[in-house]
Image: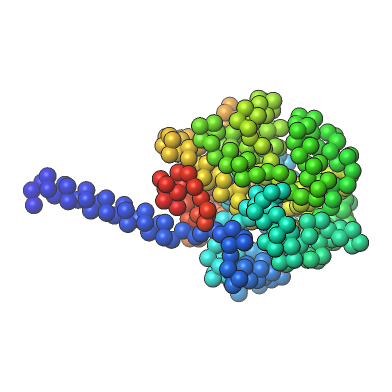
Amino acid sequence: MAPRRQVAFLLALAALSLCYTADSAAAARRVRKELRQLSPSEYKLFIQGLATLSTVPTPAGKIIFGPLYLDYTEFVVRHSVAYHDPRGDQGHIGPCLMTFHRALMLEFENVLLSVVPGLKAMPYWDFTLDGPGGKYFNTSQYIFTEKYAGNKGGDPKTNYTVTNGAFGWRPVEKFQRQRFPQYESIYNGSRTTGLLRGWVNSVDNPYVTRFPWGTNRAYNPTQMPWAALSPAMVKIMKDASDANTLYNFTTADYDRCLNASAIKSVNQWNYCADLSTVTTAPNPMEALGFASQFGISPLMHASAHFATGGLLDSLMDAGDLSDTSTSPHDILIFMAQHANIDRNALMWQANLQAANRKVAGKSVMWGYPATKAQYPTAVDGCLLHDPINSAAKFAELIPGRSKPNGYTHFDVLDLTRPDNIPYTYDNVYGALKTKFKH
């Protein structure tokens, strides 16, 4: 074969190999479905899986289901360790909101599928469908029904316990020192009750609790530090409280967070995702101005958390989904809610990468800050090459690719690029669908 023809032949083979690899990767991706799109048998598997994680302790589970198994209490405690880390919150402020929760869900999905492999992927909850005017609002498919999460508010006759739904009367344990000695110096339960709730949470109900937003004191700037910064957000929350609904965070609000022309870094996407990242930004007023300029509502993350968990009078009376520390207690909602936020992040990453492929380079990584000079208010542990939640690290996110020192924020972004991510979602659009063929 002539040299030129041989080179052309080899290039053609290489191209075919790349196409095969891309097609194979796409075919192998887990497809996360919206909760209401699960078939009856899939939904049954999901509930069975969560019930198993709730009842089979980690040592027994590892024998039965394999080495990846963790019981659900592990997720609650390790999430709380991230929140109470003495260096600062490792999962909810600054740049690490996206990567911490993406890692948490990867780990959770691995564990869930070790128990119910027939489920194929964890589901997500598109909460925009359940807000006022949403497709499922007050229908038989509404999230707050007996089939799914139970009533939006707990029963006042039982101290606001969630008494119905797939996980009605779900217990809240006390912190077990003998089980979690490695975390005790950082987190050991509520300081007043010993229950697995935040340090300052004095709610003593030993079951998952959802409060109404009972008094205007719950909106006082001393209780919600961002209240004075954004009165408009407070009004949205109070309106939802008065009507007993989720916040009015719409599909249009959700889609504004995908705008790659406006949102050009992980930091700016975080401003779209959660108000706490605005208030802890290097310049909060500038961050809020950015959100206002592009019509962004920074309530994607809080829209389900606070509207569902609720408060009575203060953060000392927080319902479980409102308690940032241990919010995974609301088991049907928490992971599925965060998967929907991750769906948004993944579509935004794809849109930005399609507009400028350099943003996905290893020295840029969608603008995730690598140094304090790039993001002065980032807490230690949340910079690009720091291990995620190092006090309770993620060591086995990809089966067979263990990292004893823990996956870093860089590792998670690198392993979940739009073109090689091991999962996708059943409803994606923009570049993730058109360019990256999800």
- Please say if 130 is above or below 257: below
x, y percent for residue 377: 66, 30
346 or 53: nearer the eye? 346
Q: Where on the picture, by quarter, is residue 295?
A: top right
Q: How is the image coloured?
A: rainbow
What residue sits 51% from the left and 50% below the top? 428
x, y percent for residue 253: 63, 40
- Please say if 40 is above or below 356: below
196 or 126: nearer the eye? 126
283 or 400: nearer the eye? 283
x, y percent for residue 343: 56, 49
- Which residue is outermost to the bottom? 64
Q: Where on the picture, by quarter, is residue 84?
A: top right
130 or 393: nearer the eye? 130
Looking at the image, residue 383 sits to the left or right of residue 142; the answer is left
- Which residue is outermost to the right? 157
- Please say if 302 is above or below 169: above
What residue sits 66% from the left and 68% below the top? 47
What residue sits 73% from the left and 41% below the top? 86
What residue sits 29% from the left and 55% below the top? 17
Camera sees residue 318: no
Looking at the image, residue 269 sits to the left or right of residue 25; the answer is right
In the rendered picture of this protein, how many numbered marks are placed on residues?
A: 0
Camera sees residue 41: yes
x, y percent for residue 427: 53, 53
Looking at the image, residue 175 sits to the left or right of residue 288; the answer is right
- Which residue is outermost to the left? 2
